[in-house]
Image (spheres, helix red, strand yellow):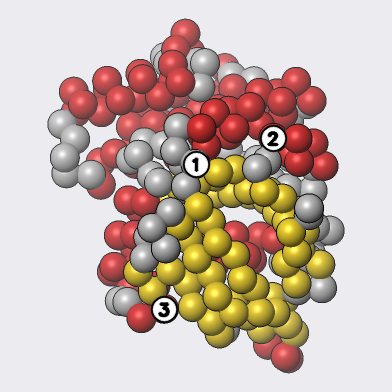
Amino acid sequence: MADSFIKAEGIKKVYKRNISVLDNINIDIKKNTLYSIMGESGSGKSTLLSILGLLDKPSDGDLYIDGVNSINIKPKEINFLRMKKIGFIFQSFYLNNSLTAYENIILPMYINPQYTYSDMKIKSHELLELVGLKNRLNHYPTELSGGEKQRVSIARALANNPECILADEPTGNLDRENEKQVFELFQHLSSLGKSVVVVSHNVDIKKYSNVCFNLENGNLKENI
C-alpha cells in the first residue's frame, strides 16, 4: 500500500429500513492521481466521499488511510487524520463573509501548532498565488465571483498541506469557464503528488481524470 493514500475494501452502507446505498465498494486511491466518481443523483456518491473522508462510517468493510485501518482507531485519532491529511471542497463555498480571502485560508491553520502567524500569512499568500488569486487576497467573498470563491475554497482545503483532496460537486454552481479552471486546478494538484477525488455528475471531468468510476445501484465500476 506504499503508493496508496486511501484503500477501501468491501465497504457497505445500509441505512434504516435496510436501505442499501453502497454494496461491497473496493477502491484504491493512489497519490499523484486524479479520480472522478460519477453517477445519478441519489446514487450514493456523496455518501461514499463522506466515508472516504472519515466524515461518516461504513456499515461494514475496512478503510485504510495512509496505511492505518480507520475502522479500529479512536475518534480523536480519526479527527487528527481528517484534519491533517484530508482537504474538503464542496459545491457551496462555506466561506466566512466577514473575513478576507487570505483570512479564510488562514483559519484551518490555527489547529496546526507548527505554524506561527507569520507562517500562516506567507502560506496563505502562496496558496492564493497557486490558485491564481494573488490579486484578490484582501477581497471579501461578497466581492468575488463564484469561480473565485471556489478557488479560495480550494486554497483553504490546501492550508495544512493535506495528502488528499476530496471534492463533492465542486463545479455545480459554476459556469463553463470557471468549471474548466477548477478542473484544470485539480489536475495540477494531482501532478504535484496529491490524491484528488472529485464526485460529479458533470461528464467533462472525464477529460481531466486519470481514473474514472461510475457508481450505480450501490456498485462502483471503473470506466475503461
Callout 3: SS? helix
Residue 207, position as x, y percentages in the image: 75, 35
Residue type at mark 3: give it.
Answer: Ile
Q: Is residue 15 above or below residue 52?
A: below
Q: Dot 2 surroundings within 10 Å: few (below 14), some, or many (20 or more)? A: some
Q: Quadrant of residue 114?
A: top left
Mark 3 and mark 2 residues within 8 Å of each other at the beta carbon: no
**Residue assigned mark 1:** 32
Q: Earlier in the sequence, mark 2 or mark 1?
A: 1
**Residue assigned mark 2:** 208
Q: Dot 1 surroundings within 10 Å: few (below 14), some, or many (20 or more)? A: many
Residue 208, position as x, y percentages in the image: 69, 35
Mark 2 and mark 1 residues within 8 Å of each other at the beta carbon: no
Callout 1: SS? loop
Residue at horizontal 44 percent and vertical 38 percent from the top: 193
**CA separation, marks 3 and 2?**
32 Å
Is residue 191 or residue 202 the one in the foreground?
Answer: 191
Mark 3 and mark 1 residues within 8 Å of each other at the beta carbon: no
**Residue assigned mark 3:** 71
Q: Is residue 75 left or right of residue 89?
A: left
Residue at horizontal 41 percent and vertical 31 percent from the top: 104
